[in-house]
Image (tube, rainbow, N blue to C red):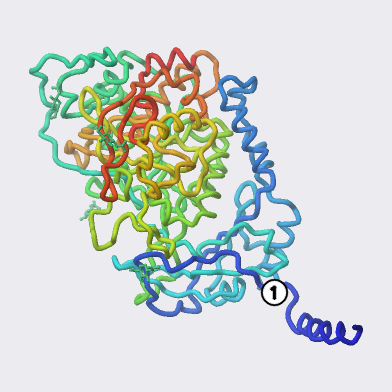
Amino acid sequence: MWANSLVVLLPLVVYVLARPSPDCEHKVKEQLGAPPRGWTIHGPAPADHSIQLRIALPQPNFGVLEEHLYAVSDPVHERYGQHLSKEEVEELVAPHPESVDAVTEWLASHGIQEESIGRSPAGDWFNIRVPVSVAEEMLNTKYHVWQHADGDFLVRTTAYSLPAVVFDHVELIQPTTMFGRFKALKSTIHSVHKANAPIPSANSPPIVDAATGVTVDASCNSTITVTCLKELYNAVGVTPSAHVGNSVGITGYLEQFANRADLQAFFEDQVPAAAAAKSTFKFISVNGGLDSQNASDAGVEANLDTQFAFGLTFPAASTFYSTAGEPPFIPDIGTPTDTNEPYAQWLDFVLSHPSPPLVISTSYGDDEQTVPESFAKRACAGFAQLGARGVTLTASSGDGGVGDGDPDPATQQCITNDGTNRTAFIPGFPASCPFITAVGGTFLVPETAVPFSGGGFSNFFARPSYQDAAVEGFLNKLPKGTFAGLFNPNGRAIPDVSAQSVNFRVFVAGEPNLVAGTSASSPAFAGFIGLLNDGRLKKGLPPLGFVNPLLYSKAASGFNDITTGNNPGCGTEGFNATKGWDAVTGLGTPNFGKLLKLVT
Ligand SMILES: *[C@@H]1O[C@H](CO)[C@@H](O)[C@H](O)[C@H]1NC(C)=O
Ligand SMILES: *[C@@H]1O[C@H](CO)[C@@H](O)[C@H](O)[C@H]1NC(C)=O
Ligand SMILES: *[C@@H]1O[C@H](CO)[C@@H](O)[C@H](O)[C@H]1NC(C)=O
Ligand SMILES: *[C@@H]1O[C@H](CO)[C@@H](O)[C@H](O)[C@H]1NC(C)=O
């Protein structure tokens, strides 16, 4: 027996002594079942290619943060509206000091000095820049240059490992297995065409919507303006204040710029008071995001979002964030750096700010399945931090109905990315994060669901309890066996709400265009949140913050229920808009007058 043990022990001891201690044993941290659909290996990654690794340290108290978030966001809780400070949030998401030490030592053992480590405000993310050769050694992996069928290149791997000493002190490291394509971070614009200037004159009498009782100019059936949205959503005559600390933000990605001259042209067309004041927005560059004011570079998405959100909320303070990506990797010219996840860059930035805008709209997204689950969850935890600080986040629900909206049958839309090649509905991210208010689309007057309105169920996030009653009500009405296996009935359901999404009259390079997409719905809904915040701030109440628990309870009666239309995709007719919440239009479109009474 003794002899046996020694025989077993000896080689082990020798093995341990023969290797640098931190690297003794690697365990697989993350591994893809198969290379994601559409990607093939182009060649080995150049050893000197530089990548910026983002290392997420666990947030052991995130559950506590979540409890605080729900307490301050629940309208019947005694702490409703008592949002947390930046410092309180940072304390709750800070990593354990042991994790900080373990990771710092591990990096030092690879020659990475403490001074060269970038850290997020809460210290929960470490950023380092290393050559591929070092990353491969650290993660016991092999990076390759991967090529997408559409021609994009990325330097990635399908698995990475960590030494036992840091395994539990690291939640995830990217870029490793993240094949989401920065270039394809989709702006959810559905279509754009030239408008016949000016706004069509309303020869016909105004439309009276029998269901809501609102009177809407006949022109709104074919062209949506700020005035149309105020008429449709019962906010005529609302005048926000410039002096109550109200603020609205728009995120921009993909080198899109919001053009100030176009904003002024839009204001002259639709918001005369803002035009007279020569109102403009504050520009904030994230990670070197540029601000070209060259009219021919203006982005339709950026112009749409800023014009409508700021047009609805003028004279509230307005901010446009331009988040840059690094250049796409091009192997032949040896691009020196690699792309990174843009939400993470933006989150780092905005979380470091002492007073971010009170509502922020995002009209960009990815198919949920193209974002690694660990990363989606961590980004979602970042959105929760903003909610806890009193910021409302809205996002477009997507423009593919229940599918991914990919018109190309060669890419086999609605096929899972995990190697099993199942057919399934494709929800979008960040809409699927339960701390975001996902906004779907409607059109026409009276309103009906727009067929492209992104809707469905997350495969990453469980259904939050604030949705239980509404979503179970919807699921129970579905004929038995409907779309069985195509969606996760226990997942976080999208959208939460909806707003008009077609024929938005947007100025681009001085000319009016008609723009469609849930890209339009999100900034429009954010505009109404801005107006509700105005109403609350005027009464000395805190801003709405993370608004979903309120919307599904006390404020549910403040919505126009949309009960017609459906959202086809994946070769199906999709879900139907129904009485109550549905997976096409959520709770419906806002009735500002009613909502204001409910929240002030
Ligand atoms: C609105 O436009 C749609 C489609 O163009 C049309 O069918 C409908 O009758 C119009 N509604 C009204 C009230 O004119
Ligand atoms: C504006 O952009 C266009 C197209 O990118 C370019 O041709 C033009 O030279 C630019 N104008 C200025 C003033 O930079
Ligand atoms: C899934 O599809 C890919 C690409 O068409 C193919 O290479 C792979 O073998 C398929 N996997 C399964 C499990 O059918
Ligand atoms: C949607 O409504 C149509 C018409 O009533 C019905 O045939 C269909 O089964 C419904 N689809 C779902 C998913 O409920």
In the displayed structure image, the side of residue 438 where residue 384 appears, left or right: right
Residue appearing at x 55%, y 74% in the figure:
141
In the displayed structure image, the side of residue 25 where residue 573 appears, left or right: left
Residue appearing at x 35%, y 36% in the figure:
479
> Neighbour class for label 1 at 10 Å: few (<14), some, many (≥20)?
some
Place of residue 291 in the rendered image (x, y in percent of width and height, measured from the top left): 35, 47
Nearer to us in this view, 369 or 415: 415
Where 250 sits versus 200, above or below?
below
Residue 519 shows up from this direction: no
Please identify the residue farthest to the front as the structure is shown. 480
Disc 1 marks a residue whose amino acid type is: Glu
The secondary structure type at the circle numbered 1 is loop
Q: In the picture, residue 3 is in which quadrant?
A: bottom right
- In which quadrant of this rendering is ligand 3 seen? bottom left
In the displayed structure image, the side of residue 477 where residue 101 appears, left or right: right
Where 584 sits versus 378, above or below?
above
Q: In the picture, residue 456 is in which quadrant?
A: top left
Residue appearing at x 46%, y 49% in the figure:
459
Place of residue 392 in the rendered image (x, y in percent of width and height, measured from the top left): 48, 32
Quarter of the image with the N terminus in it? bottom right
Q: Pointer 1: what residue?
A: 25
- Label 1 lies in ligand 3 vicinity (Cβ under 8 Å): no
Where 180 sits versus 203, above or below?
below
Nearer to us in this view, 221 or 571: 571
Place of residue 517 in the rendered image (x, y in percent of width and height, measured from the top left): 27, 40
